[in-house]
Amino acid sequence: MTANHAATSNDDASNALDLARNQRLSLLDLLRLAEALNGAGQHAAAAELYKTWVAFNDNSPAIHLAYFNYAVVLSQGGDPAGAVQAFRACLKANPEFAPGHINLGRVLEDAGLIGQAVEQWSQYAESTHHIDAEAVGHRHMILQNIGRVLEGAGKFEEAENALLQAFELRPDSPEAGQHWASLRQRQCKWPVLAPSNHLAPRKMIDAISSLTLSCYADDPMFQLAKAYRFSKTLVGACPDLSRFPRRSPKQKSGTGQRLRVGYLSSDLRDHAVGFALCEVLELHDKNSLEVFAYYCGNVRNTDSTQERIKAAVHCWRDINGLDDATAASQIISDEIDILIDVNGYTKDARAKIFAYRPAPVIVSFCGYPGSTGSPFHQYLISDGYMIPEENEIYYSEKVLRIACDQPLDRKRSIAARPSRAEVGLPEDAFVYASFNGMQKITENCFARWMTILSQTPGSLLWLLTGDDDVNQRLRDVAEKSGVAPERLVFAPKVQNPQHIARIGVADLFLDTFPYGAHSTAADAITSGLPVLTMSGKTFAARFCGSIVTAAGVPEMLCSSPEDYVARAIGFERDRKSLLEVRESIARQRETSVLRDIPALARRLEDLFWQMQGECERGETPVPDLSNLDLYYELGAETVLENIEFEDEQSYRKRYLKKLNQRHDYAPIPYDRRLWQKPDN
């Protein structure tokens, strides 16, 4: 448990007691507040808070944890009898809680009751003697299954508890930890990586997926290294390639033959990615390309976007029911020249298919916010804002660029714009909006929003609704920040045409950090709503900046968190300046880079032919995976330093310091990233 030694006022302690009596103090907040009191030497106040909480929250499924910590505080405060009583209550609530048995024995030992201590430990040892590796494995699997099913049923709290137990049981098996951290993000539970008696912070960092990391830290080098490690874990050992010899490219350049291009994704449907790609696929030059779509998502009975995609491509193949090897064989038999991964490591992705090298050229585009860090992906398509030339060191693929890495569908149906009253907003309030997923809202991000609301009386924050518990959690945090909870308004989920239509009734879109808005920002711009963002260093943290730049309003880019807050407040106070931005968006709507989809389709085709030419000449790039295991170790250390925002120079300086320290211990081979050979 990580202690917080910040001083806690008497008013805070009194307020916490009231919340505990009324069952409004979560277990996590209890632990944090009590440890702050204990760390400040206020042992009696901490004990009283625990005592009150367990008295009025006896229906909590995790009450044994409160009893356990209560016992520890009593022991530290010189009350061994109280500690014994609390440890026994802990074990009554959860007889299998090993730390309770261990610590009860220690308190008895310290009291001179050696026989009772040994008896306590012996009883636990006897009750668990049957637990072997197989039994642990079975329990771990059961807990993971419970968590998976409950997560799918929307019972996030219960799913989280089961997944945490599985994670604590097998910290080196990452799946439970990945889902646990992701669930906490989706529920806006901060800190996301909650302190644990059984898990070191480093184990938590190791467990989170590369996509979850995008929402957690703005660290592009660690993001690459995490993707590299995730790829190795996901794909596993080298598959049997005896039936999959590497294909040589066909000579097509200059012959008049069409290039066969395959898009592989689980999101070729009514989904942000499907919406983004739909018109691009319709606009591809069918005299230059034969376009294949490989759909690996769930079966859709009625899906207008998917129907449009099916009509736009030469060949649609549903590979959801095929195993990876069979799917790869299908792609090989289709003689695909360029295979485009539109999933990366997102939901329902089929990363193992690419391990069979089913096409001479494999490209990452549109679906995943970062490098795949894989040995199979040779190219990544992005844009110059998202990946400046100096930032190519954070990508294992060769980077090729289009004008803006956010395709959109200009044909999407958009309903008539509603009135504010129709969407539950007052006509005269200044409305800040953020329709990003809840998982993108970090503690620091929400704190900035509360500062903005505090400085703009009468303003509202309009958010896309989450689970009822999540909405209430955010209201509670707002209230603790001095912001009336009713100033948070939650928009119910509606069909996409209605959603895009309503976005424009807000005054200013506030982006999240480090994972900013992607298609959501494009939707806001489409509706005419100005978007305020600040760019970081990772792909996910620069995406929104790319969109507002492509929309012709780069003045909406902020240089720092402080600048972001000041400008958000400034726009509320100077609404004429905000109106000018809105008018600029409207004026450039049809001429901006963001909406020039025909040019985007032509540019993609040029890039496909460029890749084909390089492949025919034997110039296909080899993914650069050098030193990524080392960068992973350094990155894990860096992320634990918990620095939210810093400039590029400071960021690189931190890594170089660590690299030099490691090099002094054991020489590191030079690479093309940060550890480059000095010029003589």
Image: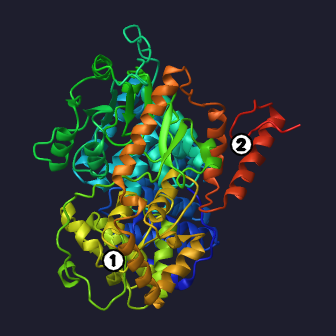
**In this rendering, which labeled residue sits more in front, label 1 or label 2?**
2
Where is the C terminus found, in terms of image quarters?
top right
Regarding mark 2 in the picture, which secondary structure is present there?
A: loop
Query: As shown in the figure, which amino acid type bears the numbered disc 1?
Result: Asn
Q: Quadrant of residue 352?
A: top left
Relative height, residue 311 to residue 317 (above, below): below
Residue 22 badge: 1
Regarding mark 1 in the picture, which secondary structure is present there?
A: loop
For marks 1 and 2, give the CA distance: 54 Å
Residue shown at 36% from the left, 57% from the top: 519
Residue that label 2 marks: 674
In the depicted view, which residue is nearer to us: 272 or 293?
293
Query: As shown in the figure, which amino acid type bears the numbered disc 2?
Result: Leu
Q: Does any portion of residue 272 appear in the rendered image?
A: yes
Q: Is residue 155 left or right of residue 42?
A: left
Relative height, residue 627 to residue 308 (above, below): above
For the image, the number of numbered tags is 2
Q: Is residue 496 left or right of residue 661?
A: left
Residue shown at 19% from the left, 67% from the top: 498
Q: Position of residue 72 (x, y in %)?
A: 55, 59
Q: Residues within 10 Å of mark 2 (few under 14, many from 20)?
A: some
Q: Is residue 460 left or right of residue 424?
A: right
Lower sequence index among marks 1 and 2: 1
Q: Position of residue 642 (x, y in %)?
A: 61, 58
Q: Position of residue 167 (x, y in %)?
A: 43, 41
Where is the N terminus found, in terms of image quarters?
bottom right
Q: Residue furthest top?
A: 242
Is label 1 in contact with label 2 (beta carbons under 8 Å)?
no
Q: Residue furthest left?
A: 301
